[in-house]
Image (cartoon, helix red, strand yellow):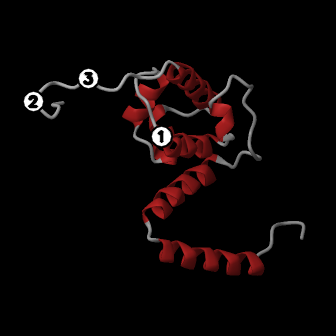
Amino acid sequence: MRGMRGQKRRPAAIPPQMTAVGERLLSLRLAAGLTERELADVSGVSHQMIQKLERGERNTTIATLHALAIALGVDLELRLTNAPARAASPAPAPDRLTIAGRIIGVLSRLPDDRVDALLNEIALWESKYPPHGE
C-alpha cells in the first residue's frame, strides 16, 4: 500500500484480542461440526476470512462477527468471551440453518422497501400458520 507521498504504509496492527476471538470461533465451529467452507456457506463470510480469523491473523467488523454468531447459533457476546458455549435458542436442523444463512445473505443485499415487503409477507404467513401447539 502507498501513502500520500508514495511511502509504503504498514497494515493496521491486529489487536491481540483477535487471537482469543479466533480461538473461540474455531472452538464453536468444531463444536457445531462444521468445516470452514460449510460455515462460510451458512454465514456468508468467505472461508478465507474464517481461516484468518481463526488464526488471529485478521481483524473484522461486528457485522461479520454477528453473521458468524447467527450461523453458529450462539449469542454474539459469547464469541467475545471465554464463557462456555450455549445455544441462543434450540439449534435448528442443519438444512434449516443453511437456508437461514442464505436468507440472511439475500436480505442483507435488498433495499429497505423490499425487506419491509418481505416482513409483511412473513407476518401474513405467521397468522395463517401459527407455531405448533397454538
| Residue 6 circle label | 2
Amino acid marked by disc 3: Arg
Which residue lies at the image location 72% right of the left edge and 45% below the top edge?
A: 91
| Residue 50 circle label | none
**Mark 1 and mark 3 residues within 8 Å of each other at the beta carbon:** no
For disc 2, the neighbor class at 10 Å (few under 14, some 14 to 19, many from 20) is few
Horizontal side of residue 79 vs 129, given as left or right: left
Which residue lies at the image location 58% right of the left edge and 31% below the top edge?
A: 29
Mark closer to the chain start, 1 or 3: 3
Of tags 1 and 3, the one toward the viewer is 3
Question: Gap between marks 2 and 1, in whole Å?
Answer: 28 Å
The residue to which callout 3 is attached is: 10
**Mark 2 and mark 1 residues within 8 Å of each other at the beta carbon:** no
Residue 96: percent from the left, percent from the top?
62, 54
Q: In this rendering, is residue 14 above or below 90?
A: above
Residue 45: percent from the left, percent from the top?
44, 43
Residue in the foreground of this view, choosing between 78 and 17: 17
Amino acid marked by disc 2: Gly
For disc 3, the neighbor class at 10 Å (few under 14, some 14 to 19, many from 20) is few
Give the image quarter of residue 133.
bottom right
Q: Secondary structure under badge 3?
A: loop
Amino acid marked by disc 1: Thr
Residue 74: percent from the left, percent from the top?
68, 40
The residue to which callout 1 is attached is: 61
Q: Secondary structure under badge 2?
A: loop
